[in-house]
Image (spheres, rainbow, N blue to C red):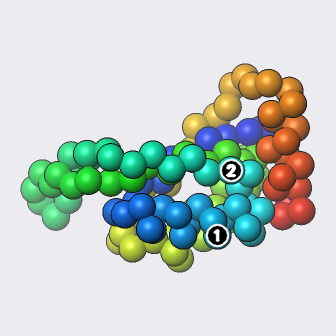
Amino acid sequence: MEYIAVNITCGSMEEAEKISKTLVNEKLVACANILGGMDSIFWWEGKVQRTSEVLVMMKTVRPNFDKVAARVKELHSYQVPEIIAFPIVEGSNDYLKWIESSVSANR
């Protein structure tokens, strides 16, 4: 099984919590870590923007990525939300088994 961590940035803590709770409840992800107090600098609409954002790091299995991305797009306020997956190269066997068992009902 391939395991991934998915990063999503949100415009508020409330949005991050709503997306996180929804994806965990729907068993698309095993867990979501919400990190507040982040400043982002990026290009948007032809100029450099700066804003405060909240980062959400979610853990799931690779086969769930398309469903995770589609659900985030439905729930997110951004026109182009960040939805980026990174492979989990190594991890504790117990933790990886927990991820898989937490999302197994969805596959």
Q: Please tell me which residue is depicted at 84% across the width and 64% down the height of the picture.
A: 106
Residue 19 placement: quadrant: bottom right
**Residue type, mark 1 in image:** Thr
Q: Which mark is residue 22?
A: 1
Badge 1, how many Cα within 10 Å: few under 14, some, many 20+? some
Q: Is residue 84 above or below residue 70?
A: above
Q: Which mark is residue 31?
A: 2
Q: Quadrant of the N terminus?
A: top right
Q: Is residue 50 above or below residue 21?
A: above
Q: CA distance from mark 1 to mark 2?
A: 11 Å
Q: Is 50 positioned to the left or the right of 1 in the image?
A: left
Q: Quadrant of the C terminus?
A: bottom right
Q: Nearer the viewer, residue 104 or 85?
A: 104
Place of residue 48 in the rendered image (x, y in percent of width and height, measured from the top left): 12, 51
Q: Nearer the viewer, residue 83 or 77?
A: 77
Q: Please tell me which residue is depicted at 52% across the width and 64% down the height of the picture.
A: 17
Q: Is 8 positioned to the left or the right of 71 in the image?
A: left
